[in-house]
Amino acid sequence: MSVEILVLFIFVLAIFVGFEEISKVPSMLHTPLMSGTNAIHGIILLGGMLVLAAADTTLSRALGFVAVVFGSANVFGGFMVTDRMLQMFKKKK
Amino acid sequence: MSSTLALIFIGVAVLFILGIKFLSSPRTARYGNLLAAAGMLVAFFATIPLMQLHEWNLNCTLIVVGILIGLVMGAVGAYSVKMTAMPQMVAAFNGLGGGSAALVASLEFLRRSHSLEGVTVSAAVPMLFATLIGSLSFSGSIIAFLKLEGKFEKPHTFPGQNFLNGVVFLVILGLCGYLIGGETTNSTAFIVMFALALAFGIAMVMPIGGADMPVVISLLNSFTGLAVAGDGFVINNLSMIVAGTLVGSSGTLLTLLMCKAMNRPVTNVLFGAFGSGGGGQAAAAGVAGTVKPIQADEAALLLAYAQRVVVVPGYGMAVAQAQHQVRELSDELGKRGVEVQFAIHPVAGRMPGHMNVLLAEANVPYDQLCEMEAINPSMDRVDVCLVIGANDVVNPAAREEKGSPIYGMPIIEADHAKTVIVMKRSMAKGFAGIENHLFYKDNTRMLFGDAKASLNALIAAVKAS
């Protein structure tokens, strides 16, 4: 079995995990959930870092730099804004 | 990748899965978010050895500076945004992620296509996929952001639009096929494809009305997830594949759940240009009855001497920033022994859960919030239903009028209450652009004015009575 097939295998399993996980979410949590998953795809920051580390022309440096800035804003802003929403869900004593 | 790093990335995947899991229950949601953030931190540090940096160079400086700029942008955005503007913020962050995903894929594509190793088909497919989906998500999110900010929120349509969009999409697919089929060194074709994908993102979102932006953002969110997964394939990073795919599939399901709450198929949201079909019929049917206004002091009496009051908040409450006044009124009524509940329609506001977030901000305990299905059966035992800036979600036309564009959408049955008080700025229509028969019912009274000002008047009058 080649590496590509193994990776594809993980991909398919992850699809099902994603579906299963949120099948029963109260609608009040839809916005925070959307925002939280939005932060998780901020992992693209790692991709940006890897690409920028390998950059060897001015153009690829510039574009890689933009990718890192965007990814970093996505990941930090995403988690912060989600936390800000969620800290308001407190039960009154 | 060494085995140690691979094991760490498995741990990261587990943290993300648990994070999303915990995010789907109110009690554990905050913890879930922190768990996912912890996973992100671990993934970040585990990536540093993968960059194969042997000495400090210009790229390292750029990475550090880039991360810091992004951190500041993200933090300022996240902490300065008003709670009412939360949906825009999610759209903006999503767009940035999509843009980043597209850039990463295109840089890899352009670099490899001009190197000796070349681009294999199995690498070209995920690269082009991530470029296409990522850039579409980027431009689409910007339009969604602007629409939520109130710029051109009306649907923009012209005859043959769906056809033209279809042609553009086919051209994009054709270019992808051409590039995959061996012409990988043709940078021009690649750049044209990139530009068309950006244009397609704009063209896809422009015809959709502001009210449907939540669905669009959720869909674009899952798109970005898939683009990130594609990038994960390209640069061989398992944690990116798992995280991206999780977001992609859970986001798709969330989108479908939202559409289900509005009782509309997702295709109708994306290609239907809301309200352009049945609007005429509904208007032609005409509205019987007259509008009966009410003054704040009289409304306050009705509320103060009721046994059970249900508040239905909508986007108007968000616009007026009136959530704190709503809480104050509810507390004041509570002190007098009135039972106050909040009925939350799944798509009230600009995002599912939007009202919950706002009311939570004002410290309304969440056991006072009821979902639509829970409250509807007992609506006829409600003395006063106070509708604050909600419109389409309480429109009985959804139940009664076959020709109405919102026919079949589940609504909060406000009209079943003994008295309905509707707080509204004017008789303007809601996002669906149709008349609301509720306003003309015999048991309905209209309290005109800005929600915040009206609520302050109500609070004062309830205190005095």
Image: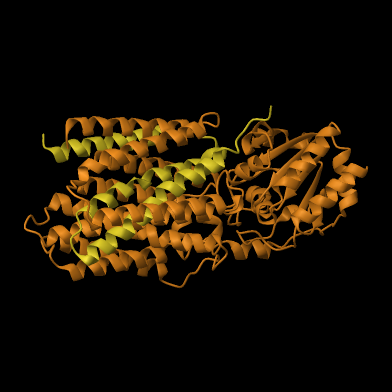
The percent position of residue B374, horizontal first and vertical second, equals 64, 33
| Residue B98 visible within the image | no
Q: Residue at x 28, y 64 (%)?
A: A62
- Residue at the farthest right position: B465
The percent position of residue B7, horizontal first and vertical second, equals 24, 29
Q: Quadrant location of residue B233?
A: top left
Q: In this view, does B448 lie above or below B386?
A: below
- Foreground of the two, B432 or B329: B329
Quadrant (top left/top right/bottom left/bottom right) for the C terminus of chain B: top right
Q: Which residue is drawn at 34% across and 30% down?
A: B14
The percent position of residue B314, horizontal first and vertical second, equals 66, 50
Q: Which residue is drawn at 48% across and 34% down?
A: B23
- Residue at the farthest front position: B56
Q: Quadrant location of residue B352?
A: top right
The percent position of residue B342, horizontal first and vertical second, equals 70, 39
| Residue B185 visible within the image | yes
Quadrant (top left/top right/bottom left/bottom right) for the N terminus of chain B: top left
Query: Colour in which chain A is shown?
Result: yellow
Query: Colour in which chain B is shown?
Result: orange
Q: Is residue B455 left or right of residue B285?
A: right
- Foreground of the two, B314 or B324: B324
Q: In this view, does B114 lie to the left or right of B233?
A: left
Q: In this view, does A49 lie above or below B282?
A: above
Total numbered labels: 0
- Residue at the farthest bottom position: B159
Q: Is residue B417 above or below residue B108?
A: above
- Foreground of the two, B107 or B244: B107
